[in-house]
Image: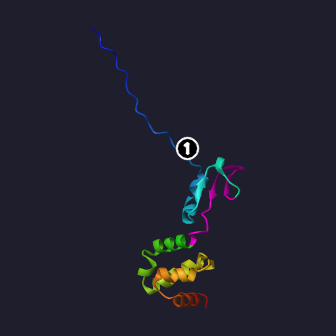
Amino acid sequence: MSRPRSTPQRTRRPPAEPERHPLVDAVSPVVDAVGATFVPPDAVEPSDVPLVWDGVTVGAVRLPPLHGALDRLIDAVETELGGTLASLARDDKQMAIRLLDERGAFILRRAVEDVADAMSVSRITVYNYLNAIHR
């Protein structure tokens, strides 16, 4: 009696991810730093920043909304300095104010008050740190 032949089972592989364009890889650190996202070429909207390589749009960058911008800036500074604003030593708090100022945080409405709250200091202290920077 002959045995039925068994057919080898094929292992299903997940679909391969599309290869990323070198331009996307090159700008990834900047996109991550500003909290933006990549958009494929077929989903580009007028408000997106197109990524063009040799005359061809290979994707786009979608910037985050302004809502929450100060929180993202604070998070980035806390990560950079290794602790929450409230837990930092005085010198590090001054550095945090300098970094936030360089990144444009204080052009946002109520930023001084919100940063003061995050640092557990008065807004006068934040203004004093800013004044020391701009002397």
The vertical placement of 8 against 30, above or below, is above
Q: Is residue 55 magenta?
A: yes
The number of discs equals: 1
Q: Position of residue 96 (x, y in %)?
A: 51, 80
Pick the residue in front: 103 or 111: 111
Q: Name which residue type carries label 1.
A: Pro
Which residue is pictured at 49% across the width and 39% down the height? 15
Tell me which segment is drawn in magenta: 47-69
Which residue is pictured at 59% across the width and 69% down the height? 67
The vertical placement of 62 against 135, above or below, is above
The vertical placement of 15 against 92, above or below, is above
Q: Position of residue 95 (x, y in %)?
A: 50, 82
Q: Position of residue 70 (x, y in %)?
A: 56, 73
Circle 1 residue: 18
Q: Is residue 58 magenta?
A: yes
Q: Please, which residue is most extreme toward the top here?
A: 1
Pick the residue in front: 49 or 125: 125
Pick the residue in front: 7 or 112: 112
Q: Please, which residue is most extreme toward the left here?
A: 1
Which residue is pictured at 54% across the width and 62% down the height? 32
